[in-house]
Image (cartoon, grey):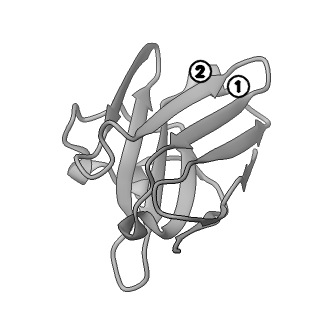
Amino acid sequence: VQLQASGGGLVQPGGSLTLSCAASGLSVDLYGIAWFRQAPGKEREGVSCMSNGDDRTYNSDSVKGRFTISRDTAKNTVYLQMNNLKPEDAAVYYCAIDGPSCPGSNLKSLLPKLYTFLGQGTQVTVSS
């Protein structure tokens, strides 16, 4: 199984980015998926989650209303659409596949180690 993350880069505050995580070796529609991020000096945190078999999505309070997780089964790819980016969103973002059901709207208990597969990360920088 391989996860290839892409789409990161430099964006001005208020801008948008779409992160992609192309999977090979498994079908993304069969598993729970999530995106995590880690800023320098901080712990990795869950930002968006989608459970297997239930396409309801959940976002952390810090990104609610701005980020959207989705998956395209035809392209076997997971996405994170990020709008109205803020400087505090700057981090390395990781996709994760094959994890537990999302813990509701409280993603603080969502941990990368609960997922079988973790992408290599893509850097997002938000700066003017």
Relative to 27, 102 lies left or right = left
Q: Residue furthest bottom?
A: 41
Q: Amino acid at mark 1?
A: Ser
Helix or strand or loop: what does disc 2 sit on? helix
Asked whether 106 or 112 is in front, the reply is 106
The disc labelled 2 sits on which kind of residue?
A: Leu
Which of the two residues, 92 or 18, is positioned nearer the viewer here?
A: 18
Q: Is residue 20 above or below residue 75?
A: below
The residue where tag 2 is placed is 30
Residue 26 image offset from top left, x and y in percent: 73, 31
Question: Where in the figure is residue 39, as x and y percent of width and height?
Answer: 42, 75
**SS assignment at label 1:** loop
Q: Position of residue 117 (x, y in %)?
A: 60, 49
User: Pointer 1: what residue?
Assistant: 27
Q: What is the crowding at mark 2: few (fewer than 14 residues within 10 Å), some, or many (at least 20)? A: few
Q: Residue at x 55, y 39 (%)?
A: 81
Image spot of residue 63 (x, y percent): 33, 47
Q: Residue at x 36, y 69 (%)?
A: 88
